[in-house]
Amino acid sequence: MPYYSYTKEGSLKEKTECAPTNGYYFLPLYEKGEYVLKVHPPAGWSFEPSEVNLIVDGSTDQCSTGQDINFAFNGFGITGKVITAGQKQGPSGVSVQLINEKGVTRNTVTSIGGDFHFTPVIPGKYTVKASHPRWALDPSQAVVQVKEGNTVLSTGVLAVRGYDVRGSVTSYGSPVVNVHILLYSKEESPKFRVEGCMTALLQGVPDAPICYSVTDSSGEFSFGLVPAGEYRLMALANPPGQPKISYNVKPEFVSFSVLHDSLFIRDTFEVTGFTVKGKVVTASSGPPMVGVRVLLDDKPVGNTDSQGYYTLTALKPGTYIVKFQHEQCELDSIQVRVLGGGQVSVPEARVARWRVCGAVAPPASRDLIIAPDRPGLAKIMVKSDGDNEGKLGDPI
């Protein structure tokens, strides 16, 4: 084992080796002055003290008076590494415990790359355990026997299976709830499995995602355990179970890498607009109205289809007035509300008044009363138009 003497300024002056049988060393110092004696043991070996400050004056110092300067050996070292599964390196911040046969525990934390060490350690049998509050480790412990010299744990005896990945979906500064986020791997056959997400089949999902997560009330989604690798995310524009709404989402995909730490992708997706669907019917629980002209803020946007549905596209959060026009009836306008969080209110539109036409014979101008056949409905008075061959005019 080498021993070194340095000047006070740190320049190497002399070095020597200790005797292999009794550990004795001899280090010549030819000049008076201030020195620092240091022992340089193998990595993990522990000596106390590790260095000694020495002032050589030729008369009163330890060397001049024949006193030994000793370094006491405290023990060997245990070194190891917590790796990321499938990788050669690992994360910092993993707690590692060293437990001897009497149950006495010592603690340390991994440094960058996943390295850790314990020293001094006397010969004996020990258990090494690794843990982290968010990450799952497997294997998470190993048994080691210290005999003579340093003990190095084999790579892979302690490994982090994966890391949590989180992100958020917003719309004009507000969190969007219930957005389905799909996770895809860039590897065709990933070696390690993603956990902490949902795997139930979804309708209308492109390709084959590994799994998916759904944004909560804070607009955040999470994947609990994602192994190291290359991935991409996609937000599902049409949320399952919500036929009345779909999202205009940017970007289409978000690519990311997982290596040795948790990942939070802030503002992962932005909902830039909402597409909502409404319906027009003749009456409550009545058949749909086909071909109704739809106006959004007095601008035509289309007609209802064969099922009575219409679509309003690219809406931003706010309140909109929707009006309807049809040659056979009148319909009251409705108010559509779109909130930034994705909540939509689209009342069902219903016919308010039907247009009734008839003729009076012989043609003449006269007052007519139309009486409903159901109680609770008011009578309607109309005037016939004598100039129109006796046809009834509009209600008054």
Image (cartoon, rainbow, N blue to C red):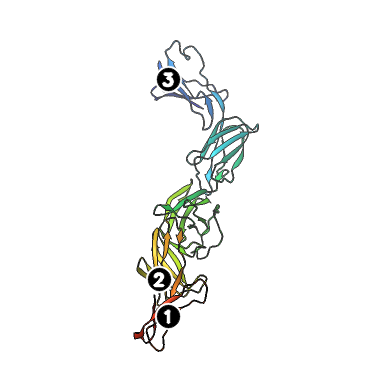
Q: Is residue 226 visible?
A: no
Report how far apart the C-alphas of labels 3 and 1 lie in the structure.
Answer: 124 Å
Local SS, label 3: strand
- Total numbered labels placed on residues in the image: 3
Which residue is label 1 attached to? Answer: 368
Where residue 153 sits, quadrant-wise, is top right
What residue is shown with label 3? 35
Indicate the amino acid at tag 1: Leu
Q: From the viewer's side, name the closer residue of 219 and 185.
A: 219
Q: Secondary structure at mark 1?
A: strand
Q: Which residue is mark 2?
A: 324
Residue at 54% over, 38% down:
95
Q: Are marks 1 and 2 in contact (CB under 8 Å)?
A: no
Quadrant containing the C terminus is: bottom left
Earlier sequence position, callout 3 versus callout 1: 3
Q: CA distance from mark 3 to mark 2?
A: 97 Å
Left or right side of 295 for 41? right
Neighbour class for label 1 at 10 Å: few (<14), some, many (≥20)? Answer: some
7 over 209 or under it: above or below? above
Q: Is residue 381 among the parts visible in the rendering?
A: yes
- Residue 388 locus on image (x, y percent): 35, 85
Image location (x, y in percent) of residue 179: 48, 57
- SS state under label 2: strand
Which one is closest to the eye, mark 1 or mark 2?
1
Comparing labels 3 and 2, the label whose residue is closer to the camera: 2
**Residue type at the position of mark 3:** Tyr
Crowd rating for badge 3 (residues with CA inside 10 Å; few <14, some 14–19, many 20+): many
Q: Nearer the viewer, mark 3 or mark 1?
A: 1
Name the amino acid, label 2: Phe
